[in-house]
């Protein structure tokens, strides 16, 4: 499902909160994981990058992969756009 970019008036310029950061981690893991699931290195890197960029720790233990459409919808709902 195509998701349009926000207009300049609707841009969110604040860092994501903890819930949005967790959704970003799951969406990233879902896109990056090979058919057998995330490698240990992928898991560590995604978790480290998320906390380094947002200040919010995330966990990918037992995450349920999401499709690109589900990821887009989750971010749309979380950001209110």
Image (tube, rainbow, N blue to C red):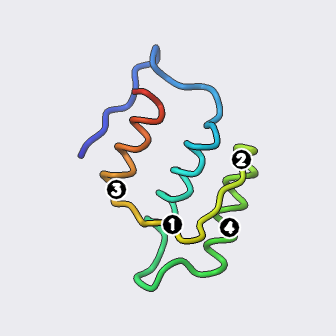
Residue contact at pointers 1 and 2, CB within 8 angstroms: no
Q: Where is residue 77 in the image (x, y as percent from the top left)?
A: 40, 35
Q: Residue 68 carries which label?
A: 3
Q: Which of marks 1 and 2 is nearer the N terminus?
A: 2
Mark 2–mark 3 distance (CA, rounded to whole Å): 23 Å
Mark 1–mark 3 distance (CA, rounded to whole Å): 15 Å
Mark 4–mark 3 distance (CA, rounded to whole Å): 20 Å
Q: What element carries label 1?
A: loop
Furthest toward the bottom, the residue is 36
In the picture, residue 31 is in which quadrant? Answer: bottom left
Residue topped by disc 2 = 56
Report the residue at 60% width, 25% height from top: 13
Q: What element carries label 2?
A: loop
Mark 4–mark 2 distance (CA, rounded to whole Å): 14 Å
Q: Earlier in the sequence, mark 4 or mark 3?
A: 4
Number of the front mark, 4 or 1: 1
Number of the front mark, 2 or 3: 2
Q: Earlier in the sequence, mark 2 or mark 3?
A: 2
Q: Position of residue 42 (x, y in %)?
A: 61, 73
Number of the front mark, 4 or 2: 2
Q: Where is residue 58 in the image (x, y as percent from the top left)?
A: 66, 56
Number of the front mark, 1 or 2: 1
On screen, 6 above or below 31?
above
Q: Residue 45 carries which label?
A: 4
On screen, 44 above or below 48?
below
Other-residue count near label 4 (Cα within 10 Å), few / some / many at <14 / 14–19 / ≥20? few
Other-residue count near label 2 (Cα within 10 Å), few / some / many at <14 / 14–19 / ≥20? some
Residue contact at pointers 4 and 3, CB within 8 angstroms: no
Q: Which mark is residue 63?
A: 1
Report the residue at 67% width, 62% height from top: 47
């Amino acid at each position: 499902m195509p998701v349009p970019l926000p207009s300049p008036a609707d841009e969110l310029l604040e860092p994501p909160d903890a819930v949005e950061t967790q959704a970003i981690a799951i969406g990233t893991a879902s896109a990056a994981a090979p058919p057998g699931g995330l490698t240990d290195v992928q898991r560590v890197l995604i978790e480290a990058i998320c906390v380094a960029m947002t200040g919010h720790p995330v966990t990918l233990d037992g995450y349920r992969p999401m499709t690109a459409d589900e990821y887009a919808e989750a971010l749309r709902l979380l950001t209110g756009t």
